[in-house]
Image: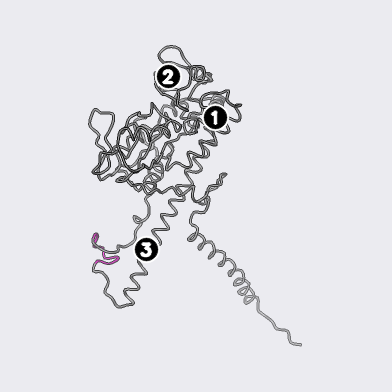
Amino acid sequence: MNIAYTPDYIMDERSSKLILVPILAVLFVMIGYQYICPAGSNSGLPSKFNFTERDLDRHVEFNIKGDDVIVFLHIQKTGGTTFGRHLVRNIRLEQPCDCKPGQKKCTCHRPGKEESWLFSRFSTGWSCGLHADWTELTNCVPVVMDKKEAQRNKRNFYYITMLRDPVSRYLSEWKHVQRGATWKTALHMCDGRSPTQDELPTCYSGDDWSGVTLKEFMNCQSNLANNRQVRMLADLSLVGCYNMSSMNESQRNHILLSSAMSNLKNMAFYGLTEFQRKTQYLFERTFSLRFISAFTQINSTRAANVDLSEAVRRRIEELNFLDVQLYEYAKDLFLQRFQYTRQREHQEVRLKRREERRWLREQRDQGRPWPSKHKGSGKGDGGVFEKETENDLPTTTEDYTSQVARW
């Protein structure tokens, strides 16, 4: 009986091929999936929230010449003053905002029209009240703009805001109040009226709360610094405005947080103070507008210089437990949007290059002469195609530390 003998090295070669085939198949599927679904539901980043592609894709067709208006909801101590100045002084526009020396407000009109495209502190002033919140702005802005500007067509309002780490924001507000800030002229309008003294008691007697210690600041139960970001982003009419007796505290907190999350997610854009360059990047891609100068990350703030014990930090987090949950949600969604937008932009660049190469091959196969200034000619502007470089890809937007004057 003849027994066929296969040398070991041949067996090893066959085994290697058998193992290699499924590996290559898996790699092929993974690469194909990246092209078909470049971001997915979580953009490749671990997430505890179930965001959809619709949640991540925030590009809007903002028509500055038409009926669109950007409305900036300015929450105290979130870097909103700096961002607000970017909006009126740092956007590359056909008709830039007119900012005269010595004047607090700029005129931001549409090209060729006497109509404003921006509703913010530095353009229209505090037209809906000092640091008006979501409840106030959504009810007030359309009315105010109709009074100021007669317009036939219905306006499209795109709400934007800035958020900040709750502990840092809280400490920054404390330091600001300690220096004499009050915001006592804020209206806090809800369901057509401001809160009564019983509904919103003040934390101090006299003109301001100058010199307040952190302990005193934390001990005032009616301090509006507590969970300020959730309150200013939620629809307060859902919980009876400032009437704490309309429902139990647990139910009220749940409704406020859910409303704030929903409103934030559905805004056209929001940025995070801790991620200035990513904030710039996402704003530019959302509205198809470009800033003239790059945003600067400032980490040497007054809040950063406060020496906290672990017990005090935990106490601040407890006082702002709703803001802590909102910020966790906001940061996750923000980074998912950034990753999604970057991946999509990279994919668009690759597809554009692929189409250019395909077109050039077709021209060559058909015997047609290539453009005189073709790809790789090095002739610069005027060429139909230029050689692909790293500059063709979206620029890096990593955040960095800078010792610029504190805000």
Q: Amino acid at mark 3?
A: Arg
**Segment tinted magenta in the rendering:** 373-381
Which residue of the protein is positioned furthest toward the top in this rendering? Answer: 206
Q: Nearer the viewer, residue 395 or 361?
A: 361
Which of discs 2 and 1 lies nearer the camera? The answer is 1
Q: Are marks 2 and 1 in contact (CB under 8 Å)?
A: no
Q: CA distance from mark 3 to mark 2?
A: 57 Å
Residue at the image position 48 percent from the left and 21 percent from the top: 195
Q: Which mark is residue 356?
A: none
Q: CA distance from mark 1 to mark 3?
A: 53 Å
Task: Kindly identify which numbered label has been placed on residue 178.
Answer: 2
Q: Nearer the viewer, residue 116 or 12?
A: 116
Spatial distance from mark 2 to mark 1, Cα to Cα?
Answer: 31 Å
The quarter of the image holding the C terminus is: top left
Seen in the picture, residue 59 relative to 135 is either above or below; the reply is: below
The residue that mark 3 highlights is 353
Q: Which residue is mark 1?
A: 239
- Which colour style is shown? one colour
- Amino acid type at circle 2 is Gln
Q: Is residue 67 left or right of residue 76?
A: left
